[in-house]
Image (cartoon, rainbow, N blue to C red):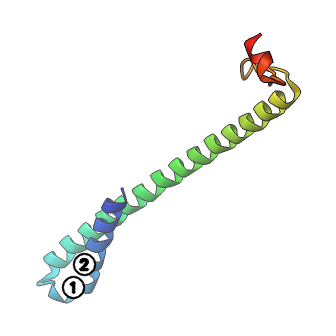
Amino acid sequence: MLQKIMALSSRVLDIILFKKFFKNREDTRAKISSLEDTVYDLETIIIKQSYVISAISAIQEEVLSSISVLSSEAASGKRSSKHGMILPIPDSDDDLIN
């Protein structure tokens, strides 16, 4: 996606920097139309990225919340039906065998 943004940005710069090479009014209109399409593509990519970032943030918050709950349950030896069974930590290696 970053490569596409770079390519589109490069295209925008090409059109802006080399506008003196526009031969006539039709050529100018075609370049402007192309520039508008490119800007629209960039806006679409940015919007999609913001949705992805929001989704990742929500997932991260849920994971951190779950880790916090699981840590608390593990420390107390309790279990939560939401997160599955938490086994108590054995006091010694002998407890592992039994």
Q: Position of residue 81 (x, y in %)?
A: 76, 17
Q: Position of residue 14 (x, y in %)?
A: 24, 79
Instruction: Check disc 1 and report the residue beneath it.
Output: 18
- Toward the bottom, the furthest residue is 20
Q: Say which quarter of the image contains residue 29.
A: bottom left
Q: Is residue 22 left or right of residue 70?
A: left
**Residue at the spot 55% in from the left edge and 51% down from the top edge:** 53
Q: Nearer the viewer, residue 73 or 20?
A: 73
Residue 35 visible in the displayed image: yes
Q: Nearer the viewer, residue 37 or 4?
A: 4
Q: Nearer the viewer, residue 38 or 32?
A: 38
Q: Quadrant of the N terminus?
A: bottom left
Q: Which mark is drawn over residue 15? A: 2
- Toward the left, the furthest residue is 23
Q: Is residue 57 left or right of residue 96?
A: left
Q: Position of residue 11 (x, y in %)?
A: 26, 72
- Toward the front, the furthest residue is 94
Q: Is residue 51 left or right of residue 35?
A: right
Q: Quadrant of the C terminus?
A: top right
Secondary element type, mark 1:
loop
Secondary element type, mark 2:
helix
